[in-house]
Amino acid sequence: MGSPKSTPQSLDTRALNKRWLENWQAVGPILEAERWARVEALTDDETRVAVQRLLELWRPDWPTDDGEGLLLQQRVFARARPNK
């Protein structure tokens, strides 16, 4: 089996994807820095409100779920956090 032939549409799509990736590589770190600057600028009260809003979004996946899914997510995020 040979490789599939490239069509003009697939070449256009590849070019668009390449441009998007190049753009994201340039803009991504800028946006990440801004996001962290905003997080670091939060007051304790603003942080409490933001955390409360996030926790209010959680809903049990099943009637007997008392937060096991949320605890699992917290463990995953804790392991993914870079060591400082």
Image (tube, rainbow, N blue to C red):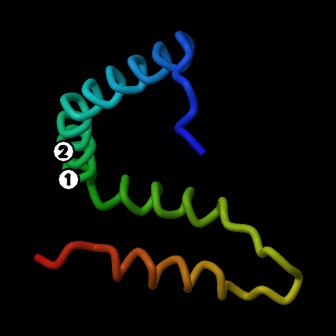
Q: Is residue 48 above or below residue 11?
A: below
In which quadrant of the rendered view does residue 22 lie?
top left
The amino acid on which the numbered mark 2 sits, given as a three-letter code, is Ala
Residue carrying label 1: 40
Label of residue 3 in the image: none
The amino acid on which the numbered mark 1 sits, given as a three-letter code, is Glu
Question: Seen in the image, is 55 located left or right of residue 35?
Answer: right
Q: Identify which residue, 33 or 29, lies in the foreground.
A: 29
Q: Residue furthest front?
A: 1
Q: Which quarter of the rendered picture does the N terminus lie within?
A: top right
Real-space Cα distance between discs 2 and 1?
A: 5 Å
Q: Which class describes the residues within 10 Å of circle 2: few (<14), some (14-19), or many (20+)?
A: few
Q: Is residue 6 above or below residue 44?
A: above
Q: Position of residue 33 (x, y in %)?
A: 18, 42
Q: Residue at x 75, y 68 (%)?
A: 59
Q: Residue at x 55, y 25 (%)?
A: 5
Question: Seen in the image, is 53 located left or right of residue 15?
Answer: right
Residue carrying label 2: 37
Q: Identify which residue, 37 or 78, lies in the foreground.
A: 78
